[in-house]
């Protein structure tokens, strides 16, 4: 994946060089709000005594911010390299023999570097667009995510029983699809609004928990796989 990102980054830089005289390059910044959707898990060896299983994974709402640099290949297609940060919350249950159930709550952090392509349903050159013109688009992207569960807490019977040590980072391949519209503000500036759907990849807890009653305990990590997210966003694009 790193090699792919490097090669595509070089490709975008080359397009920048050849397009520099045509004002077809751009930078954009967007911000938005959305929901972390439920993921999957095959965890069967986590928690107390290394014999718990995970269930009822539930995401919460949070924010995102993104910055990208790209170039128009032609009037209908653009490519860009983006950095995105997504912050959310997530909860899940741990089921143990007995049976007994504990609840886990954590903040999530995802940092994504992605290569994106955008197709514009456009009948004219970008340079010929005039104020007020609105152009719909669809987009897709692939890249790398660094995901982290932070401030993870474990509850039993409504009471805090443990916190997890050493939040772990998990690197995954990430994907994105989206749609939206661009509205021309002036010759070099456009307003963007849309929605994206992400597959962020996997999240993993630490291997040790700190019991409130006293003492550290080694555990197998809880692993949440293929976590997805939707984000509604707005932003600005500046051509140069």
Image (cartoon, rainbow, N blue to C red):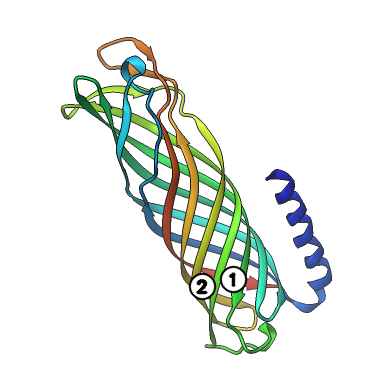
Q: Crowdedness of circle 2 by 10 Å Cα count: few (<14), some, many (20+)?
A: many
Q: Secondary structure at mark 2?
A: strand
Q: Nearer the viewer, residue 191 or 173?
A: 173
The disc label shown at residue 237, or none: 1
2 or 1: tag closer to the N-terminus? 2
Q: Nearer the viewer, residue 71 or 54?
A: 54
- Where residue 147 sits: x, y (%)? 50, 40
Q: Nearer the viewer, residue 22 or 174?
A: 174
Image position of 215 with respect to 181: above or below: above
The disc label shown at residue 158, or none: none
- Where residue 83 sits: x, y (%)? 59, 53
Q: Locate the C terminus and report the quarter of the image it occupies.
A: bottom right
Mark 2 to mark 1 CA distance (whole Å): 7 Å
Q: Secondary structure at mark 1?
A: strand
Q: Crowdedness of circle 1 by 10 Å Cα count: few (<14), some, many (20+)?
A: many
Q: Nearer the viewer, residue 6 or 186?
A: 6
Q: Within the image, what quadrant is residue 39 found in?
A: top left
- Where residue 231 sits: x, y (%)? 43, 60
Mark 2 and mark 1 in contact? Answer it, CB < 8 Å. Answer: yes
Would you say 234 lies left or right of 35 here? right
Would you say 33 lies left or right of 2 here? left
Q: Residue at x 32, y 48 (%)?
A: 60
Q: Residue at x 61, y 70 (%)?
A: 118
Q: Residue at x 49, y 51 (%)?
A: 199
Q: Residue at x 54, y 75 (%)?
A: 137
Residue projecting furthest to the top: 215
The disc label shown at residue 192, or none: 2
């Amino acid at each position: 994946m790193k090699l792919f990102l490097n090669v595509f980054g070089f490709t975008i830089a080359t397009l920048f060089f050849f397009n520099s005289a045509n004002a077809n390059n751009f930078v954009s910044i967007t911000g938005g709000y959305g929901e972390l959707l439920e993921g999957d898990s095959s965890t069967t060896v986590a928690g107390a005594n290394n014999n718990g299983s995970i269930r009822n994974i539930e995401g919460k709402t949070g924010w995102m911010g993104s910055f990208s640099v790209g170039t128009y290949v032609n009037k209908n297609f653009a490519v860009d390299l983006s950095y995105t940060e997504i912050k959310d919350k997530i909860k899940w249950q741990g089921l143990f023999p007995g049976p007994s159930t504990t609840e886990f709550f954590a903040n999530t952090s995802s940092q994504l570097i992605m290569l994106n392509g955008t197709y514009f349903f456009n009948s004219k050159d970008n340079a010929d667009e005039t104020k007020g013109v609105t152009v719909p688009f669809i987009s897709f992207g692939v890249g790398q995510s660094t995901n982290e569960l932070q401030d993870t807490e474990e509850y039993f019977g409504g009471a805090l029983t443990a916190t997890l040590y050493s939040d772990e980072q998990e690197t995954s391949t990430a994907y994105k699809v989206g749609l939206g519209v661009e509205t021309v503000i002036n010759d070099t500036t456009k307003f963007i609004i849309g929605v994206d759907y992400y597959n962020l990849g996997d999240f993993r807890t630490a291997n040790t928990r700190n019991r409130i009653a006293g003492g550290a305990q080694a555990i197998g990590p809880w692993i949440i796989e293929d976590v997805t997210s939707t984000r509604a966003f707005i932003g600005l694009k500046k051509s140069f």
